Amino acid sequence: MKKEDTVKLISAEGFEFVIHKDAAMVSQTIRNMLTSPGNFAESQHREVTFPEISTTILEKICQYFHWNLQFASGKETEFPIEPELTLELMMAANYLHT
């Protein structure tokens, strides 16, 4: 995968997830950050920091982005969510518009 095809998402603890740009674009918020006109750091460096989203939650979000790309047409499978992550995931999903 070429560097220009990737996006780095950084959690509150500083953990970095490098994922495919198409997967990151599942999120309307991330898409806006990366494609907005102007000289925004996010679009120039393809890095987005989420100071309010923990590493555990951001990891699950990245998994969801890839799952969504794979199953977007038919959703033949369910995306597994551990019950203890539900509230934090809902809050993050609301922010990310996923």
Image (spheres, helix red, strand yellow):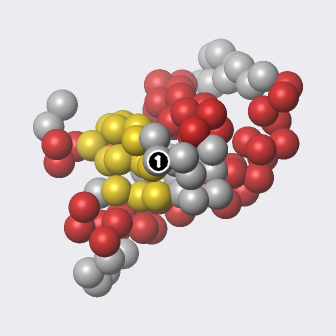
In the image, residue 45 sits, relative to residue 37, either above or below, namely above
Q: Is residue 83 visible?
A: yes
Query: Which residue is depicted at the point 57% across and 39% down?
Result: 55
Query: Which residue is depicted at the point 34% across and 66% down?
Result: 42
Residue under numbered circle 1:
14
Which amino acid does the dot numbered 1 rest on? Answer: Gly
Query: Which residue is depicted at the point 69% across and 51% down?
Result: 92
Quadrant location, the N terminus: top left
Q: Quadrant of residue 47?
A: bottom left
Q: 4 or 45, which lies in front? A: 45
Q: Position of residue 59 (x, y in %)?
A: 55, 33
Q: Quadrant of residue 80?
A: top right
Q: 53 or 32, which lies in front? A: 53
Q: Is residue 68 visible?
A: no
In the image, residue 64 sits, relative to residue 14, either above or below, namely above
The single residue placed furthest to the front in the displayed view is: 13
Q: Position of residue 6 (x, y in %)?
A: 27, 43
10 Å crowding of disc 1: few (<14), some (14-19), many (20+): few
